Amino acid sequence: MGMYTIETPPEPDVQHPRSAWISFLLETIQTIVLAVALYFLIDSVVARVRVENISMEPTLMPGEFILVNKLAYRIGEFNRGDVIVFHYPPNPQEDYIKRVIGIPGDEVMIGNQKVLVNGYELDEPYISAEPQYDGTWKVPPGFLFVLGDNRNQSSDSHSWGFVPVENVVGKALVVYWPFSELKLLSQPMTVNAANAP
């Protein structure tokens, strides 16, 4: 009489409700951890700032939102014409947004409704009106001279002094909201005029 082997089929892989729930919970936790990590990574590089006042009109209007590159000056240099966000020197709890006019070593002279840097008049199509004040400032090492584009309605370096470079949060890159006002924030003309031969 021959011998027969009867093979029993493998038991179906049935996932118990409890293990499915644990698997779902672990995947959810991983997703949340990844989302939080990405948020903090992006937040360490880019800031989102809401414009609150009129000091940068017409370039920036109250209520607009801008993106700020926090790494711009860790890997690059300050340039005349850059729009920057910084901690206001007399009260570092407040953040201001202004345009860089003078970098360390520059002499800024304002008079006869004109702004001159190192003796060269700036071409400034972005301002709301010519400045109605006078003064001369020599920018010391480690500091910046900044002005609002709304020259006569701006609290800036002409009234309270220089901005320490360590107070700078970053360089404003773009207006992203509202979409109808979407624009890049760069002004090479200021740089060219200030560096004229």
Image: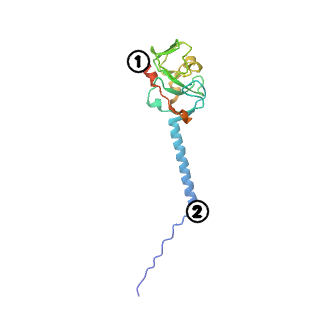
Q: Which quadrant is the N terminus positioned in?
A: bottom left
Q: In the orientation shown, which residue stands out farthest toward the front?
A: 180
Q: Quadrant of residue 97?
A: top right
Q: Secondary structure at mark 1?
A: loop
Residue plotted at (57% across, 64% down): 16
Q: In the orientation shown, which residue stands out farthest toward the bottom?
A: 1
Residue 82 drawn at (x, y percent): 48, 26
Q: Is residue 3 above or below residue 115?
A: below
Residue 5 drawn at (x, y percent): 43, 80
The residue under label 2 is which amino acid type? Pro
Q: Secondary structure at mark 2?
A: helix
What's the mark number on residue 196?
Answer: 1
Q: Which residue carries the number 2 mark? A: 17
Q: Are marks 1 and 2 in contact (CB under 8 Å)?
A: no
- Mark 1 neighbour density, 10 Å: few (under 14) some (14–19) many (20 or more): few
- Mark 2 neighbour density, 10 Å: few (under 14) some (14–19) many (20 or more): few
Residue 72 drawn at (x, y percent): 47, 31
